[in-house]
C-alpha cells in the first residue's frame, strides 16, 4: 500500500513524492511554471506569452478605406448600377502597364472607375488576344468587363472590329453596353463628320437619346480635351467627357489616361452607364497611342 502523498509507479520502482525536492534537485514551488506540482525537466521552454506592443508618440494606425454604401435599387435599374442613381460625375483612371511602357508591347488595358472622393467604384478590364492588340492596335475589337468591389460583373462593353477612317461612313465605330451581361441597355455609335468626332448615345432599341461632340484637334498639351455631351438638337450642353492632363512624364512615356465624366443627376441610370462607356471608346480612338503604331 502507498502512504498518503505518494504516487503509484511502475513495478519495481520507488513511489515518487510530488513535493519532494530531491527530483531533479529543484524545489517545485520555486518555479512559477510548475504550479506546485512536479518539477520541470531540463530543457523545458515555457510557452510564449504575447505582450502588448507600444507605439511611438504620434503614431497613427492605418486607415481602412471606407466602404461605398449601395443604395436601394429603383425600378428599372439593372442590378449593380444602383450607385449611378446618386452621382453626377465619375473619374476613370487607366492603370500604367510596366511591360507596355518599357517594351512597347500592347497589353490589356485596365481602368479604375472612381467617384469624386477618389473611392473605387468599379474595376474595368479589357479582354482581347495578343495578336489583335499587336496587329490592329487602337482599332482592335475587345470586350470590357466592369466589376464591383465584390467581383460581380455589372457592365459589359463589346466593341466589334470597325474602320477608323472618315472615308468609310458605312463602317464606323460602335460600342454595345450590356447590364447585366447579355442584356443590351444602350449603344455608342460614331456619326460621320469630315473633321469633328461625333457620337450618338442610343437606348436598347437604338433610338437616339444624346449626342457627343469632340474638338477639331485632340492634342492636349498641358490642358484638358473636352468632349461635350449635348441634347439631340445640339442646343444645350448637359455634360462632358474630359481627357485630363496627367503630367508630362505620364503623357510622353505611357498611354495611361485620366478622364472625367459628367452627366445630369436626373439622367436615366442606363444612359449614365452608356455615357460612361463612351469614355472608353473615346480613349481607344483618340488617346490609345502605342510606340508600335506611331
Image (cartoon, helix red, strand yellow):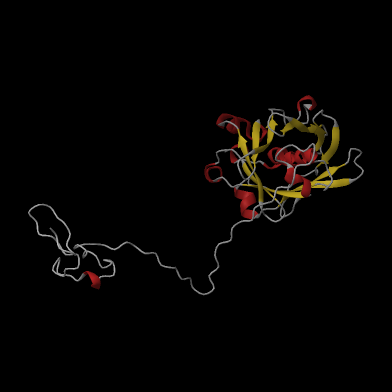
Where 41 falls versus 207 (above or below)?
below
Q: Residue furthest left?
A: 12
Q: Is residue 233 left or right of residue 180?
A: right
Residue 198 in view of the camera: yes
Q: Residue at x 64, y 32 (%)?
A: 142
Q: Please state which of residues 170 and 116 is positioned toward the viewer in this rendering.
A: 116
Residue 266, above or below 126: below
Task: Report x, y in % for residue 211.
Answer: 84, 38
Q: Quadrant of the C terminus?
A: top right
The foreground one among 70 and 246 is 70
Looking at the rendered image, the quarter that the N terminus falls into is: bottom left
Residue 9 lies, in percent from the top left, at: 14, 55
Pick the residue in front: 54 or 232.
Answer: 54
**Quarter of the image holding residue 136?**
top right
Furthest residue toward top: 170
Question: Looking at the rendering, which quadrant does residue 216 occupy?
Answer: top right
**Closer to us: 27 or 264:** 27
Say left or right for 114 vs 9. Answer: right
| Image location of residue 60, percent across then percent down | 55, 68
Is residue 3 placed above or below 143 in the rendered structure? Answer: below
Residue at the image position 13 percent from the left and 68 percent from the top: 22
Identity of the residue drawn at 19% across and 71% down: 27
The spot of residue 97 in percent (x, y) is 56, 45
Amino acid at each position: 500500500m502507498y502512504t498518503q502523498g505518494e504516487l503509484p509507479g511502475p513495478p519495481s520502482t520507488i513511489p515518487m513524492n510530488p513535493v519532494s525536492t530531491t527530483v531533479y534537485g529543484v524545489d517545485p514551488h520555486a518555479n512559477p511554471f510548475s504550479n506546485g506540482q512536479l518539477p520541470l525537466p531540463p530543457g523545458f521552454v515555457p510557452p510564449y506569452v504575447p505582450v502588448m506592443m507600444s507605439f511611438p508618440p504620434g503614431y497613427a494606425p492605418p486607415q481602412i478605406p471606407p466602404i461605398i454604401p449601395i443604395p436601394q435599387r429603383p425600378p428599372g435599374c439593372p442590378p449593380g448600377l444602383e450607385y449611378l442613381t446618386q452621382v453626377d460625375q465619375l473619374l476613370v483612371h487607366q492603370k500604367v502597364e510596366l511591360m507596355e511602357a518599357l517594351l512597347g508591347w500592347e497589353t490589356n488595358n485596365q481602368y479604375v472607375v472612381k467617384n469624386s472622393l477618389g473611392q473605387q467604384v468599379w474595376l474595368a478590364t479589357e479582354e482581347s488576344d495578343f495578336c489583335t492588340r499587336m496587329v490592329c492596335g487602337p482599332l482592335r475589337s475587345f470586350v470590357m468587363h466592369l466589376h464591383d468591389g465584390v467581383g460581380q460583373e455589372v457592365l459589359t462593353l463589346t466593341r466589334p472590329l470597325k474602320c477608323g477612317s472618315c472615308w468609310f461612313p458605312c463602317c464606323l465605330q460602335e460600342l454595345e453596353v450590356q447590364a447585366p451581361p447579355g442584356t443590351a441597355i444602350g449603344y455608342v455609335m460614331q456619326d460621320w463628320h469630315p473633321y469633328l468626332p461625333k457620337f450618338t448615345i442610343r437606348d436598347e432599341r437604338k433610338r437616339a437619346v444624346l449626342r457627343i461632340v469632340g474638338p477639331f484637334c485632340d492634342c492636349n498639351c498641358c490642358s484638358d480635351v473636352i468632349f461635350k455631351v449635348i441634347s439631340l438638337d445640339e442646343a444645350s450642353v448637359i455634360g462632358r467627357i474630359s481627357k485630363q492632363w496627367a503630367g508630362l512624364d505620364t503623357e510622353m512615356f505611357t498611354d495611361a489616361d485620366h478622364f472625367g465624366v459628367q452627366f445630369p443627376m436626373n439622367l436615366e441610370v442606363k444612359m449614365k452607364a452608356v455615357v460612361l462607356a463612351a469614355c472608353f471608346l473615346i480613349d481607344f480612338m483618340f488617346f490609345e497611342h502605342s510606340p508600335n503604331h506611331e
